[in-house]
Amino acid sequence: MTDTPSNISKLAQLISLAQEPSSVKRRELLREVTDLFFATSEHQSARELELFDDVMMDLTREMEAEVRAALSERIADAAQAPVGLVRSLANDEIAVAAPVLSRSPVLTDSDLLEVVNKRGQDYLRAVSRRVDLSETVSDVIVERGDDTTLGVLLQNETAVLSRRSAETVVDRATANPDLHEAVINRHSLPVDLLNEMYFVVEARLRETITARNAAISPAELTTALETSRKRIATRDGALPPDLAEAERYVSALVSKKQINPSVLVSFLRFGERTRFLVALAQLADIDFNTARIIVDRKEVDALAVVCKAANFDRALFLTFTLLILDDDLAMGRAQEYGALYNQLTLETAQRTLRFWRIRRDTGDVAA
């Protein structure tokens, strides 16, 4: 459609018809204007777009929500849609706003920020579904969104999250199992943050973490470790009162070269728990609290990672496992635990353990 006198005249006629008080006729007129817009959208001038904007906004102002919602759905994907109209629809009730908030290329970050800073969770979820959502808008959604909204955002792989927002996501997911799957399955989550989730997610999601660890290149691993930031997490409580004594005792054995796997077994058998944890941390080169989590929570798969990375043999891993579990069912599952150990590769175990060592290297306490 070119900016000709006849076209301008036609739009002028539509503007005059927009004063029609009948809602039925206004709906018919809105449909006619919308059809005209789509039929000529590739060739509209700036003046014509402005006229379309004026007419369609005037027509929709008093239309029923159902009519506005239908218009929003129809116009949501139009690259040249009237800007004023789209902004108006984006700030309408959610049934009307959702299509344009989720899809309209006309809306800018400024438009979206106005919505996500002022509106409720349904609006934030609609924006969270946008393709190529910017980091700026995502940051506000992470800040203002509830966990349901956060789950929607995480499932949108095209939404860009800043490092700060990714850390916030992991902190919140640690406390909410409903977010675990969305976090672990997000391909763009930094791998060091992914590994922070290891001790709080279920076994099948841990397999996803170790599989990703196995797939990353040495260069990616180095970068992830270098960019990992210190994250304080002291939720495990006070250190045991006999820690200092245990550290002195184990250090003395180390200096005499008397620390070995059989000594660790004896610590477990005679109930010397803190000495065992200190010695395991020494031999596996991890921090004390990570060792404590593994033992306190009876984390068999995490124990397998530690033992495999430390080059302990399968028999020693099974001995540790049975002594730590210390129940009637453990012996019957020894074959299952052995298979778990055999399936874990040394390379994957070592990569996973390097992320746990970040806590030791930075002085953090394990989550």
Image (spheres, rainbow, N blue to C red):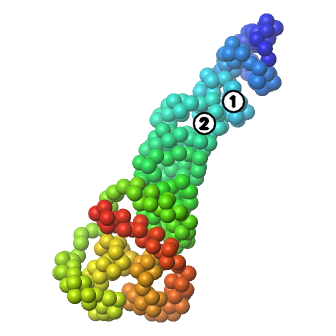
Residue bearing the label numbered 2: 101
- Between 266 and 140, the one nearer to me in the picture: 266
SS at mark 1 in the image: loop
Q: Of the residues shown, which amino acid type is indicated by label 2? A: Leu
**Relative to 236, is 315 on the left or the right?**
right
SS at mark 2 in the image: helix
Residue bearing the label numbered 1: 79
Position of residue 278 measured from the top left corner of the image (x, y, whole percent): 28, 79
Q: Is disc 1 in contact with disc 2, using a CB cutoff of under 8 Å?
A: no
**Circle 2: is it few (<14), some (14-19), or many (20+) Cα within 10 Å?**
many
Position of residue 287 measured from the top left corner of the image (x, y, whole percent): 31, 71
Evaluate whether residue 271 shows in this view: no
Determine which quarter of the picture holds residue 12.
top right
What residue sits 42% from the left and 71% below the top?
353
Q: Of the residues shown, which amino acid type is indicated by label 1? A: Ala
Position of residue 306 measured from the top left corner of the image (x, y, whole percent): 41, 78
